């Protein structure tokens, strides 16, 4: 498991993933609540902290660290539709545009490839153009629009990345 918790690629010396601690969840929840898309949907910091602190074997929640610094969180639903579903990816503003999100996606894809998954999935809010562009740059393709999934009057976009079967 230790090998699975190291980031792939050029970020492996800096970015690491570990099961999220209660303290980290409590710190991240309010920070994410102040950021879109969670702020747009009026998610409470306490609710996000409780979600992040939750334990579910089929849906691990991990904190992302850059060196010793808490940088964000990633939550995965294993074995969704022939591959993992990225339920949550949040990077604190001071770590954005520094390759941390890319390292998280590289790590997730490497994990999915090792497990012989055929797909990696994610949903992003239609208004969250930055997230949509980020996932598309990483090879995800829009496959469906889900009207009103999170709130009436909004769309969520389901994206898929097909993996080479080895």
Image: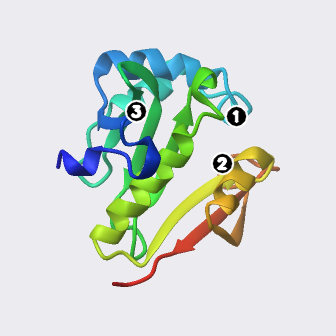
The mark that comes first in sequence, 3 or 1, is 3
Q: Tags 1 and 2 in contact by the CB under 8 Å rule? A: yes
Disc 3 from disc 1: Cα separation: 32 Å
Q: Residues within 10 Å of mark 3 (few under 14, many from 20)?
A: some
Q: Residues within 10 Å of mark 2 (few under 14, many from 20)?
A: few
Assign a secondary structure to mark 3. Answer: loop
Foreground residue among 30 and 41: 30
Q: Report x, y in % for residue 106.
A: 46, 55
Q: Is residue 76 left or right of residue 40?
A: left
The mark that comes first in sequence, 1 or 2, is 1
Q: Tags 3 and 1 in contact by the CB under 8 Å rule? A: no
Q: In the picture shown, does residue 68 fall above or below 97?
A: above
Assign a secondary structure to mark 2. Answer: loop
Q: Would you name the residue on which mark 1 appears?
A: 41
Q: Would you name the residue on which mark 3 appears?
A: 14
Q: In the picture shown, does residue 71 fall above or below 163?
A: above
Assign a secondary structure to mark 1. Answer: loop
Q: Is residue 128 visible?
A: no
Q: Residues within 10 Å of mark 1 (few under 14, many from 20)?
A: few
Q: Is residue 134 visible?
A: yes
Q: Report x, y in % for residue 73.
A: 44, 34
Q: Would you name the residue on which mark 2 appears?
A: 150
Residue drawn at the location 55% of the way across and 48% of the way down: 102
Residue drawn at the location 35% of the way across and 19% of the way down: 68
Q: Report x, y in % for residue 33.
A: 61, 23
Foreground residue among 100 and 116: 100
The answer to which image quadrant residue 165 occupies is bottom left
Q: Nearer the viewer, mark 3 or mark 1?
A: 3
Quarter that holds the C terminus: bottom left
Residue drawn at the location 26% of the way across and 38% of the way down: 55
Q: In the picture shown, does residue 61 fall above or below 8?
A: above
The mark that comes first in sequence, 3 or 2, is 3
């Amino acid at each position: 498991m230790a090998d699975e918790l190291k980031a792939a690629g050029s970020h492996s010396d800096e970015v690491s993933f570990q099961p999220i601690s209660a303290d980290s969840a409590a710190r991240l929840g309010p920070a994410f609540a102040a950021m879109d898309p969670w702020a747009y949907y009026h998610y409470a910091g306490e609710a996000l902290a409780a979600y992040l602190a939750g334990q579910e074997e089929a849906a691990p929640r991990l904190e992302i660290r850059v060196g010793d610094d808490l940088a964000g969180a990633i939550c995965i639903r294993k074995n969704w539709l022939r591959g993992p579903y990225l339920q949550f990816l949040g990077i604190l503003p001071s770590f954005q545009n520094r390759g941390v999100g890319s390292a998280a996606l590289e790590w997730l894809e490497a994990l999915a490839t090792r497990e012989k998954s055929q797909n990696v999935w994610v949903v992003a809010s239609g208004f969250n153009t930055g997230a949509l562009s980020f996932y598309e740059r990483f090879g995800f393709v829009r496959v469906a629009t889900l009207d009103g999934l999170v709130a009436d009057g909004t769309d969520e976009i389901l994206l898929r990345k097909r993996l080479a079967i080895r």
